[in-house]
Structure formats: structure tokens, C-alpha cells
Image: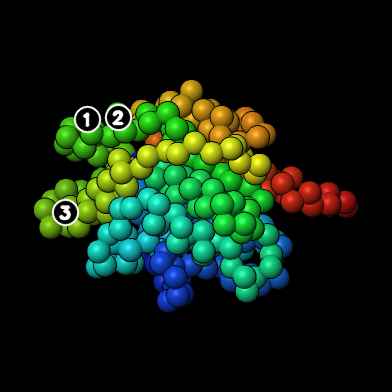
Amino acid sequence: MGVGFTEESTSVTVAASAVPERVVLAARPQAALRLYCVPPAGAGPECYLRWAPLLPPWIEPCSVALPGRGTRAAEPSLTDPAYLSARLAAVLDDWTDPRPFAVFGHSAGALLAYEATRHLRRTHGRLPSLLAVSSLSAPHIDAYSAGLPPRLTAGLEGIRELVGPIPDQLLADARLMAAACTPLLADCLLLLHYRHRPEPPLDVPLALYGGEHDPVTSVQDLQAWNDLVTKPAPTQLFPGGHTYLQTETKALVGHLAGTLDAALNRPVATA
């Protein structure tokens, strides 16, 4: 449910305030909107570094660093979805920055983005201009709870379905492989610990993204997110499977930028 095992590290500056910690992928203080990209299972903010040059200058790309993942892999992993989503909500609703914000989450990141938005509503915080979710079944139907355990016990093939290709250098080194799998397992536990509590639908614009041949999340289960909002959204599918955003980054970011443009009701540029 992540976006592949890599040995990349991020050189971006991580704020040392909240948990999760805000990571600004490209500082754009004059941008009209902040876009928070919540990492997928087992990954850190570095998986979104390629987004920065693809986004228009009026969007400031940000991410979040979770304990036990990415550059914080040495820390204990937190697997309580309620705790993490509440802390994520505090990062999203930054009282020092009045600009509107949007949030995108892929796989496990989509669950945290959704629950953080619900937490903001419960606590009367600012709501995002757009909630964009990718490659995760709607949380109220529990589809991933049934599908995760068989994949976790299926060996490498099950892991590949969740994260995509695994580099040969990881497969050849048991210690590196264990280090790569630890954050993935933490996020799988987070998903399995989750219990959906019914609340009124969110009055927040929604965007739905997925891969055309995703073995983990069916189109029907992705479309079920529309049950949880007041304004249903169409599902935008891209070539690929569960980790389609590795190969379809440019197309996904372009579509998301257009959706954000419409959500903010920005004036149409004229020649």
C-alpha cells in the first residue's frame, strides 16, 4: 500500500514541532494554497519530492513525517490511527498561516487525511479546500481489513502488491529488507487497528484517484468514498496498479492541480 521500497533520503528541512512533523517540499510563501501530501504505507515525505516542480507556483507542496517512517525510521512507530490523525489535524490547521489548504493521501495516507479532516470538523477547525484520496477502499466498508492479512502472509508477492517493485539490493540483504518492511508493517497495523465511527457526511470537496488494475483496491470500493461526503466526486483512474503514482506522477499532479484550481474558484487566466 506504499509506493515502493527505495534507498532515497530527503534533503528538505523538517520542522521540529508537532508529531507528525510538517515538511515543506518547496517553500513558496506567496502561494495561494498549501497542499499537504500524506505518505502512503511504509513511506516518508521523500516519495513526494518529484511533485514540487510539477505543481504550479500558486501551490506550496508540503508533506508530513511520521514517527518510524522515512527520515524518522529510527523512532518507534505509532500505529494508533486516532492519535496520529488528531496530531495530523493540528499540523494541517496551522494558525500561523491563514492560507487555505488541501490534503492528498495515498493508501494508508488517505485514511489519515480523512480522519484528520473529521477531527478538524469535530473541533471546529478550518476544513481543507479539497480532500483527495488515492488507492484506498472507503474506510466504512472494511475492505482492506479482509484483504491485508492474506497479503502479509503471502511472502514477497504479497508485499509487491502493496509497495510495487522491490530493488535487488534490498532482496539481497536481509537486514535492509527488514528495515524497509518495518514501517510498512506499522502502517498495515494502523489500518487493521482502525474502526470507523459513523458521523454525518463531510461537506468538503472530494477527489478520488486510483489505478486501473489495482489488485488491492477495486473501483467499486474506491467509489464508496462518496458515501462519506455531501458532494459525490467522479473517480479518476490512471494506468497501473496500486502504486500507479510512481509511473503516472505527471498526469496525477496535473489533474490534481486542475481540481484544486476549480475548488478555489480561481479566475481563469486570459491571454
Ranked by sequence position, the earlier of labels 2 and 3 is 2
Q: Residue furthest right?
A: 271
Identify residue for label 3: 178
Tell me if residue 53 can be seen.
Answer: no
- Pointer 3: residues within 10 angstroms few (<14), some, or many (20+)? few
In space, the residues marked 1 and 2 are separated at their CA atoms by 6 Å
Residue named by callout 2: 147
| Residue 244 place in picture, x, y as percent | 44, 38
Give me the C-alpha separation between circle 3 and circle 1: 19 Å
Mark seen at residue 81: none
* Residue type at the position of mark 2: Gly
Q: Is residue 218 above or below residue 113?
A: above
Tell me: residue 120, above or below residue 164. below
Dot 2, how many residues are within 10 Å of its Cα: few (below 14), some (14-19), or many (20+)?
A: few
Where residue 43 sits in the image (x, y, percent)?
A: 35, 54
Question: Which image quarter: residue 34?
Answer: bottom right
Is 128 or 10 nearer to us in this picture? 128
Q: Which amino acid type is shown beneath numbered disc 3?
A: Ala
Mark 1, residue position: 150
* Amino acid on which disc 1 is placed: Pro
Please give left or right for residue 48 compared with residue 131 in the image: left
- Locate residue 262 relative to residue 188 in the image: left or right: right
Residue at the image position 30 percent from the left and 58 percent from the top: 78
| Most foreground residue, 7 or 232 | 232
Q: Is residue 111 visible?
A: yes
**Residue drawn at 61 percent across, 59 percent down:** 125
Q: Disc 1 vs disc 2: Cβ atoms closer than 8 Å?
A: yes
